[in-house]
Structures are given as structure tokens and as C-alpha cells.
Image (cartoon, grey):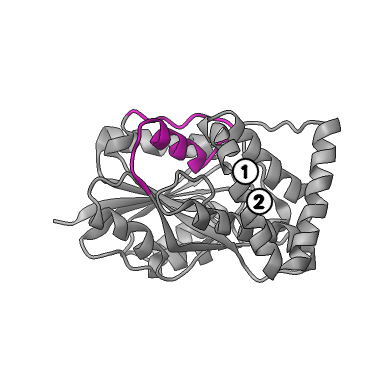
């Protein structure tokens, strides 16, 4: 008997890219012994044609049980994740929940297989994480691209069993997370999952071949949001308490990437310095609804 899996894709104003995302997920093959129970796209009150594009895609792929739930008001990514998580706990249709947090990202071939295969190898495994790497990028995107590569290198230094929180694609067994609840706030993705797994000593795994290609930020204010919002979220969780232990590895990862990407490194450190100056004089504030970085969607 196959293990049922569910897929959740939060989306907001993704009409231009969500078809490509769904196509990539549809073409991916699950490991033997796993099967899809259903897919769900949670539309966070988009003001473009995202729901229409998803409905058209569904009509063209009758082999995939996909639904779209549209919120009447923007409630944030954590709310979307939480509603589906609790609904699955009540109804129990699937054993493993797969989250694709960036509907404008491109899941590489083989990534879902790589992400889910460890669950078959280790029946105790609670969660797996993939990685974000940049799509081809321009000069304006150097700083953001460098940050993605440095995060990748840090994960490798930490090892495959580290509790991480830097991914667009991750999966977890529902049973070990029955007492877990997504909390609204800026820690809107796997920061909360990683924190819960750490506190409860749940075994997790980083999967090097589970890659999502994302567009690096091309404007400073988007880079500022990408840097500041996750750090603010981590500071409010146990992920923040781990930051000190990782500082040396972060520095090593940054220097390792800088040796191979010196121009991107210069751009990153220059923009990062500006981020710190701005935060010193005017600390950033974020609402519970995640802020979409326009330049990561090709809007400038």
C-alpha cells in the first residue's frame, strides 16, 4: 500500500508564473511507494488572475486532484499553511505534507524524488528540506544571488541533519507534528517547523538534490526585506538562539563563496552594510502578511 502525500502551494499574485510551477511539480516523479492524495493551492486574495490560471491548469490535468481555496482577505502565508495542516490532522487523508512556498519558483527535475526518498529510507524521519538557488541573474541581482549561494554553502557546512530554515521546498510527516500549530507572524515558512523539530528532538534531513530555482531580488528595498524579515522571525524563535553557534560557520561559508564570486560578494557586503545602517536608525516593522518582493517577480 502506497503512502499518501499532499501538496500545498501558497500563492499571491502568481498569474504569470504559477503555471510553470505546477507544470514542474506535475512532471516530477514520486519515489516508489508514495503517491499523491491531493494538491491544494491557497490563494491569499490575489488581485490578478491567479485563481483563473490554476483552474485552467486543473481542467487541463484531470489526472491530478487539485483544488484552489481563495481567501476573501489577505491573511498571510502562515495562516494558509496552518489551516491546511489542521484540516489534514482532522481528516487524515495524507501521511506526508509537501510544501512549495514559492509559487513563482521553478522546482528542478528530480527534486521531489530527492526530497521524499529519505522518508522511505528512515521511517523515523520527521522532516526534510531542500534548497533555494538563483536563476540566471543580472548585475542588479548580485547581492541577493550571493546570499542564496552563501546559505547553500552554510547548509553544507552544518551537515545534512542540521535544523535549518532556509528553503522553499520542504516536507514533513504529519504524525510527529500533531502538537504543532502554525503561528501567524513573520516566521511564515519552515522556521517554525525547524524550531518545533529542534525543541522536540525530531530527526530531520537536508536533501542536497531538492532544488528550487528562484529569482534573486533586483532592488535594494527587496533585498532589505529578504535580509531583515527572516532574521526578525528567527530572533523570536529558538532559531535565534542557534544563530550564535553558527556565526563562525556563516563567516566561513561567506568567504568560501566570495572566493569564487568576488563581484557578487562586493555587492552583497556593500548592500548588507547599508541594511545595517538603516536598521540602526530606523528598525524595520513587518505585518503578519508576508511582503512580496516585486523584483523577484520581474516587476522592476
Q: From mark 1 to mark 2, how far is it between C-alphas?
A: 6 Å
Residue at image coords 82%, 33%: 280
- In front here: 166 or 92? 166
Q: Callout 1: few (<14), some (14-19), or many (20+) C-alpha neighbours within 10 Å?
A: few
Q: Callout 2: few (<14), some (14-19), or many (20+) C-alpha neighbours within 10 Å?
A: few
- Indicate yes or no whether the magenta region holds residue 214: no
Whole-percent x and y of residue 30?
A: 30, 64
Q: Quadrant of residue 242?
A: top right
Label 1 SS:
helix
Q: How many marks?
A: 2
Label 2 SS:
helix
- In front here: 90 or 242? 242
Q: Is residue 297 visible?
A: no
Whole-percent x and y of residue 39?
A: 37, 53
- In the picture shown, does residue 279 fall above or below 273? above
Residue at image coords 29%, 36%: 176
Locate the C terminus and report the quarter of the image it occupies: bottom right
Give the residue pinned by disc 1.
247
- In the picture shown, does residue 206 fall above or below 245? below
Name the disc covering residue 200, or none: none
- In front here: 194 or 61? 194
- In the picture shown, does residue 86 fall above or below 132? above
Whole-percent x and y of residue 275?
A: 80, 43
Name the disc covering residue 251, or none: 2
Residue at image coords 55%, 31%: 241
- Indicate yes or no whether the magenta region holds residue 184: yes
Q: Quadrant of residue 186?
A: top right
The answer to whether residue 24 is left or right of residue 286 is: left
**What is the magenta range?**
179-204
Give yes or no for contact between labels 1 and 2 (Cβ–Cβ under 8 Å).
Answer: yes
Residue at image coords 54%, 55%: 103
The answer to whether residue 47 is left or right of residue 23 is: right
Amino acid at each position: 500500500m502506497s503512502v499518501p502525500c499532499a501538496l500545498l502551494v501558497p500563492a499571491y499574485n502568481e498569474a504569470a508564473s504559477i503555471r510553470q510551477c505546477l507544470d514542474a511539480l506535475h512532471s516530477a516523479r514520486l519515489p516508489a511507494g508514495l503517491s499523491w492524495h491531493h494538491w491544494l493551492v491557497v490563494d491569499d486574495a490575489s488581485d490578478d488572475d491567479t485563481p483563473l490560471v490554476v483552474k485552467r491548469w486543473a481542467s487541463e490535468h484531470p489526472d491530478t486532484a487539485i483544488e484552489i481555496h481563495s481567501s476573501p482577505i489577505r491573511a498571510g502565508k502562515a495562516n494558509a499553511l496552518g489551516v491546511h495542516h489542521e484540516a489534514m490532522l482532522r481528516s487524515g487523508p495524507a501521511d506526508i505534507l509537501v510544501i512549495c512556498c514559492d509559487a513563482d519558483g521553478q522546482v528542478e527535475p528530480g527534486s521531489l524524488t530527492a526530497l521524499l526518498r529519505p522518508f522511505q529510507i528512515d521511517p523515523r524521519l520527521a522532516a526534510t528540506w531542500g534548497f533555494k538557488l538563483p536563476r540566471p541573474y543580472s548585475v542588479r541581482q548580485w547581492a541577493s544571488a550571493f546570499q542564496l549561494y552563501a546559505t547553500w554553502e552554510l547548509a553544507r557546512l552544518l551537515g545534512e541533519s542540521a535544523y535549518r530554515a532556509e528553503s522553499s521546498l520542504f516536507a514533513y510527516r504529519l504524525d510527529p507534528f500533531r502538537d504543532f500549530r502554525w503561528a501567524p507572524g513573520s516566521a511564515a515558512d519552515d522556521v517554525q517547523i525547524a524550531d518545533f523539530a529542534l525543541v522536540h528532538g525530531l530527526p530531520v534531513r537536508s536533501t542536497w538534490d531538492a532544488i528550487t530555482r528562484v529569482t534573486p531580488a533586483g532592488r535594494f528595498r527587496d533585498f532589505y526585506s529578504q535580509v531583515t524579515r527572516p532574521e526578525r522571525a528567527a530572533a523570536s524563535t529558538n532559531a535565534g538562539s542557534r544563530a550564535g553557534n553558527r556565526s563562525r560557520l556563516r563567516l566561513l561559508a561567506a568567504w568560501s563563496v566570495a572566493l569564487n564570486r568576488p563581484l557578487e560578494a562586493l555587492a552583497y557586503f556593500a548592500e548588507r552594510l547599508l541594511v545595517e545602517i538603516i536598521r540602526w536608525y530606523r528598525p524595520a516593522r513587518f505585518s503578519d502578511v508576508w511582503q512580496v518582493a516585486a523584483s523577484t517577480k520581474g516587476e522592476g
